[in-house]
Amino acid sequence: MLSPSFPNSNNLQFHICMKIYFPLTVGCDMKKEIDMVKKIYNAIVINKQETVYDPDRFREFCISAGATKLFDTILGSITSLRHSADRTCLNKKKGCFIYLQLVLLS
């Protein structure tokens, strides 16, 4: 947001105000974690085992594959503390879908 400041009539100044919504330290190495899950997910698809779509089981699956932060990072980017429990549950399902799309498209 730009706001003009007029300390005197001959000089026009602007002050820039930035808002940061997420801490810069939050996140993970997405490429590395997607590759970890992709190896195990491909083995499951090739062996025709049951795929995991339940958000809690899927999160545990990702952690067991070595991707400890990616699911929570994706969920944190689409969920707010102001969301209801139902909305958070829906966002977990969306997070699974986003994660699977990242695995399949990478």
Image: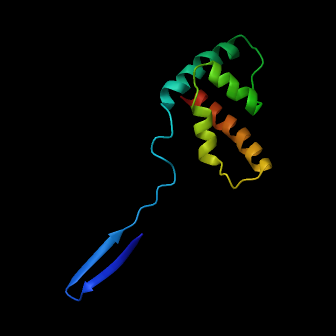
Percent of width and height locating residue 58: 71, 27
Tell which of 67 and 96 is nearer to you. 67
The furthest residue to the right: 86
Left or right: 50, with 33 as reference point: right
What colouring style does the render use? rainbow
Q: Give the quadrant of residue 69.
A: top right
| Residue 74, x across and y down, in percent | 60, 39
Q: Residue at x 60, y 22 (%)?
A: 37
Q: In the displayed image of the protein, which residue is found farthest to the left?
A: 10
| Left/right of residue 60 with respect to residue 11 in the rendered view | right
Direction from residue 48 to residue 41 in the image, left or right: left
Seen in the image, is 36 located left or right of residue 98?
left
Most distant residue in the bottom direction? 9
Residue at horizontal 53 percent and vertical 22 percent from the top: 35
Q: Nearer the viewer, residue 59 or 48?
A: 59
Residue 87 in percent (x, y) is at 76, 50
Residue at point 78% right, 48% down?
Answer: 85
The residue shown at (68%, 12%) is 46
**Between 91 and 15, which is closer to the camera in this rendering?**
15
Q: Quadrant of the N terminus?
A: bottom left
Give the total of numbered labels.
0
Position in image of residue 92 (x %, y %): 71, 40
